[in-house]
Amino acid sequence: MNRFLLVFLFVFLVSFSAQAQLLIVALFGDQLNSGKIEFGLDGGYNRSWYLARKDAKGLNNFNLGFFFHIKMTESSTGFISTGVHVKSNVGASGMPTYSIGDADFDEVYAEGELITKVNVFYVPIMWQQRLGKLYVEAGIQPGMRAKAFDYFRIEDYGGDLEYQRDVRDDYTRLDFGMVGGLGYRLKKGPVSSSIGVNYYAGIVDVYKPDTYHLKNSSLYVYGRIPIGAGASKEK
């Protein structure tokens, strides 16, 4: 259990680095993907949106990270499912542009589209219950905001135009919400890739200005591929 606690601490503090995967492999060695501890790459497609803005549409994104599963007891079919979305965006598209205080700029982009992309490192912490090859999982998902940009776009103005504006100061550093979904393991046994769908519903207002109260939400369609000593041995 001491090793498990160290790994959780490690995930929160240094897993945002790409070197985290190599350190976990070195720490657990042959125990990885042996039945008790599972580790690998996690990635796929996600569509995010703001439920509180009626003028906002969804935003298509790709996400990439790693997962980490810990079996609680020898006879249990339940796991603690965690990891990090190292590359993950939330936000929305299709919104009207706003004034930045420059009359010429405002005139050019007045009929354009506003797209917001916020890069957040999410750490899902869920209970995963397996039912044969199927599994369900649910829990919490804290996140830490890194970058945030507004993109002003307009078409057919003598060519497509885009302007990028740094808006990270408009968004809170931390995000938090509930996450859950279901998945399917492609084969039986301790070493198996899987596919699944998860939904994240933020419960924190992440937008600082008073003009909107925005909460992030995102639908994830993902694939998980085990890596490490156990997976290599099985192969």
Image: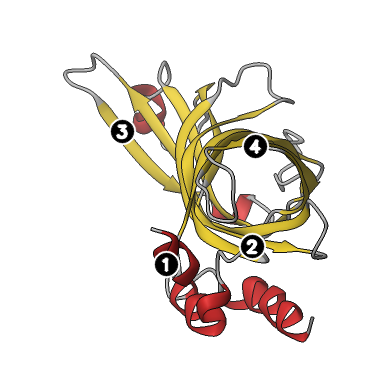
Q: Which sits earlier in the primary sequence, circle 1 or circle 2?
A: 2
Please tell me whether residue 216 is drawn above or below residue 72 in the rendered image.
Answer: above
Nearest the eye: 65 or 146: 65
Residue 28 visible somewhere in the drawing: yes
Q: CA distance from mark 3 to mark 2?
A: 50 Å
Q: Which residue is mark 4?
A: 133
Q: Which residue is mark 2?
A: 35
Residue in the picture at 31% in, 33% down = 162
Q: Which sits earlier in the primary sequence, circle 2 or circle 4?
A: 2
Residue in the picture at 69% in, 54% down = 124
Taking the view exactly as shown, the residue that stands out farthest to the left is 158
Label 3 secondary element: strand
Q: Amino acid at mark 3?
A: Glu
Please tell me whether residue 234 is drawn above or below residue 156 in the rendered image.
Answer: below
Q: Which residue is mark 1?
A: 233
Q: Which mark is residue 162?
A: 3
Label 2 secondary element: loop
Q: Which sits earlier in the primary sequence, circle 4 or circle 1?
A: 4
